[in-house]
Image (cartoon, grey):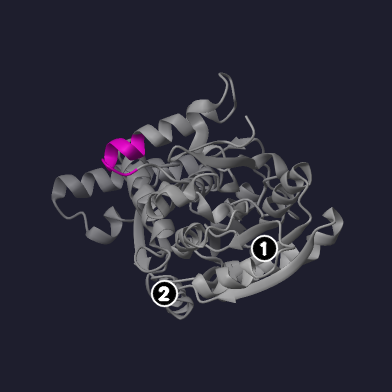
Amino acid sequence: MKGLWIRTLAATAALWTVMGILTAPLAQADTLKVGAILAVTGPASFLGGPEARTMEMLVEKINASGGVGGHQLQLVIKDSGADAEKAVSFAKQLIEEEKVFAILGPSTSGETLKIKGICEEAKMLLISCAAAELIVNPVARYVFKTPQNDSDAIKHIFTTMQKMGISRIAFLSSNTGFGKAGAAQLKKIAPDFGIQILLEEVYDSKATDLTPVVTKVAANPEVQAVVNWSIEPAQAILAKNIAQANLKLPLFQSHGFGNIEYVKAAGAAAEGIIFPAGLLLVADQLPEGHPQKALLLQYKKDYETKYPGELASTFGGHGYDALMLLAEGIKAGGADREKVRSAIEGIKGFAGTAGVFNFSPSDHVGLGMDAFSMLTVKDGAFTFYGK
């Protein structure tokens, strides 16, 4: 019956085309409008910029190949500048005025946590590009995320510290949703690994000089390493301030460090930084036959060809995963949001840039510990740590 209806509609549309009276609303009937709230500008632009450009690239490619599930995609990007209040306003606009089919993003955890309830109440699909575990824990029926869990990142860091004989640390974080969520997880997990937090400092995400914080770390001779949890340029500023203070301590960053622009900003001070990340940054170093290698290399090639002079980052990868998971859901559920939601929740073995996704009703991130590897900076580039 459905097939007959589609054929009838197609025949009618063809007739109207011939008659020259095909209206714009009917021409758009098979178009799904997808909203995206991303920090294209502002302190988190190293995240939102690549995410926006990746989504634009993918939508162009999908539409050029005939669309997904018979539907063309129309991407509506709202630049939040990482402002949570703007994200709230844009979420309401996209839901109530733009009537979008789904929302991708936001780029940051604080923004996502602000709109999580709004999307859930409106039964609006939300696939976030932010990392905080609170986004998916507790699980909300319509909310998913693509970055790995911050708790898994912390476990990787602490495991590495144990191997290095480190048990006493200073913990620094920015005053953002990502920083606060990371701090809560780190303090919760530290005892399980025998890690003592001797000093904890929270700094402003817009800080341009962290010398006072570094001075406090230097004043405590018991500190064996520094862990920093942020996504802003402060990551590079901290590395430079530590080098300027001639403080010889290992510096661990969060998975928010996965953009080579942070390395460029820190210069020589970035050498030796250790952090957990997905495999996109070292895709060319993966063995042949790895389930993600071909996809990662293709995405890097496509992105770096489309945007000359800019290297692909894990953040663009989060945008890639968000859009491709939505497309996978549309393939199965068409334009029925409930069916698409169920289809995404049922995805198994889907290779993305952040790892191989296996969702379930109780797991809306779908990634495990194996989605992370420990990386470091060597000669201005990313490479596996300890290999």
Which span of residues is magenta-colored?
A: 302-310
Residue annotated with mark 2: 90
| Circles 2 and 1: CB atoms closer than 8 Å | no
> Furthest residue to the top?
288
Question: Residue 228 appears at what percent x and percent y?
Answer: 60, 61
226 vs 26, left or right, is right
265 vs 15, left or right, is right
**Within-10-Å neighbours for mark 2: few <14, some 14–19, many 20+:** many
Question: Residue 77 appears at what percent x and percent y?
Answer: 35, 62
Give SS at disc 2: helix
Labels 2, 1: front one: 2
Q: How far apart are marks 2 and 1 (CA)?
A: 21 Å
Identify the residue shown where x is 29% and y is 47%: 12
* Among numbered discs 2 and 1, the one appearing first in the sequence: 2
Q: Residue 119 carries which label?
A: none
Q: Which amino acid does label 1 sit on?
A: Arg
Question: Residue 74 appears at what percent x and percent y?
Answer: 34, 55
Residue annotated with mark 1: 141
Give SS at disc 1: loop
**Within-10-Å neighbours for mark 1: few <14, some 14–19, many 20+:** many
- Residue 191 occupies which quadrant of the picture? bottom right
Q: What residue type is labelled 2?
A: Phe
Q: Does the magenta stretch include residue 13?
A: no
Q: Does the magenta stretch include residue 309?
A: yes
How many numbered marks appear? Answer: 2
Identify the residue shown where x is 48% and y is 63%: 241
